[in-house]
Image (cartoon, rainbow, N blue to C red):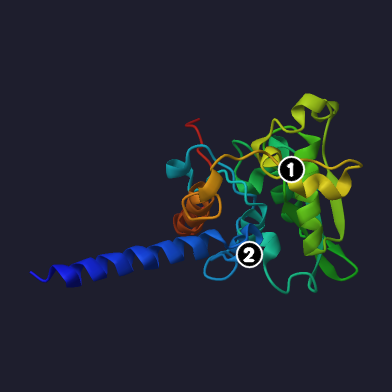
Amino acid sequence: MNFPFLRNVFLKGILIFAILSLVIGDIPADILGKISIYNSLIPGRLRLPFGETPQRSYNLSLYNLDAMFAAHEISKSAAADKETRIILLGDSSIWGTLQKPEETLSGRLNARNLQICGKSVHFYNLGYPTISLAKDVIILQRALQTNPDLAVWVTTLEAFPKDKQFASPLAENNRGRLMATQGTEVQPAVVSGGILDGTIFGRRRELADWVRLQLYGIPWAATGIDQDYPVR
């Protein structure tokens, strides 16, 4: 057996793996999030990804807001010139917990086939479960990049208490997005990991969530199931 040859192959393999882990780990979250099979290979989702039972709902909760929007129908190309775009913001009542997409507020409104100035009106469901003004502001900030014509924000006084603002994991993991709207600097959430932070190991949860979102898109597109519906 040629041990020097095997040793060289092993060392080169380790070196290539280390380089790839650094390169992949160094991909900015916003660039990674914009890479998606949604709105190209498969349709965009009718509501933002959210789910605690991914195996039964072909959905999951993640914190990469760009990946969430890339998976949503609002990111489909060339739609802005053909329709009046209205976004709906809010909590689970807007997202539609236990409701099928066509039963939600956006689904009911879209079923009316409304028109304004000769353009069709499309309502985009950007609700997200959990009650928090900070969470809604973060989603609104990102939604403005899609150039909506109108934003309808449905909220209550229950979303105002200070202790609720970052109780939503989505808001807690996107504190940096609030910096532009705060009078004082908002410190990003503290994440442990040390020397591995900028590698594939330090970002394994983020990368795994992104991969799962793409994979779940295929069975979701085939079934339309995006949450676990209890038997009625």
Bin the neighbour count of mark 1 within 10 Å (Cα to Cα): few under 14, some 14-19, many 20 and up. some
Mark 2 element type? helix
Answer left or right for 97 relative to 85.
Answer: left
Note whether 157 is above or below 90 in the view shown. Answer: above
Q: Residue at x 60, y 56 (%)?
A: 45
Residue 232 in the image: state x and y as whole percent.
Answer: 50, 30
Task: Give the residue pinned by disc 2.
Answer: 31
Q: Position of residue 6 (x, y in %)?
A: 19, 68
User: Which image quadrant: the N terminus?
Assistant: bottom left
Mark 2 or mark 1, earlier in chain:
2
Local SS, label 1: helix
Q: Position of residue 207 (x, y in %)?
A: 51, 54
Q: Amino acid at mark 1?
A: Arg
Q: How many marks?
A: 2
Mark 2 closeness class: few <14, some 14–19, many ≥20 residues within 10 Å:
few
Q: Nearer the viewer, residue 28 or 48?
A: 28
Report, in whole angstroms, how far the alpha carbon at label 2 lies from the one at label 1.
18 Å
Q: Nearer the viewer, residue 229 or 49?
A: 49
| Identity, as a three-letter code, of the amino acid under mark 2 | Ile
Q: Say if 73 sits above or below 154 in the image.
A: below
Asked if one can make out residue 121 in the rendered structure from this viewpoint, the answer is no
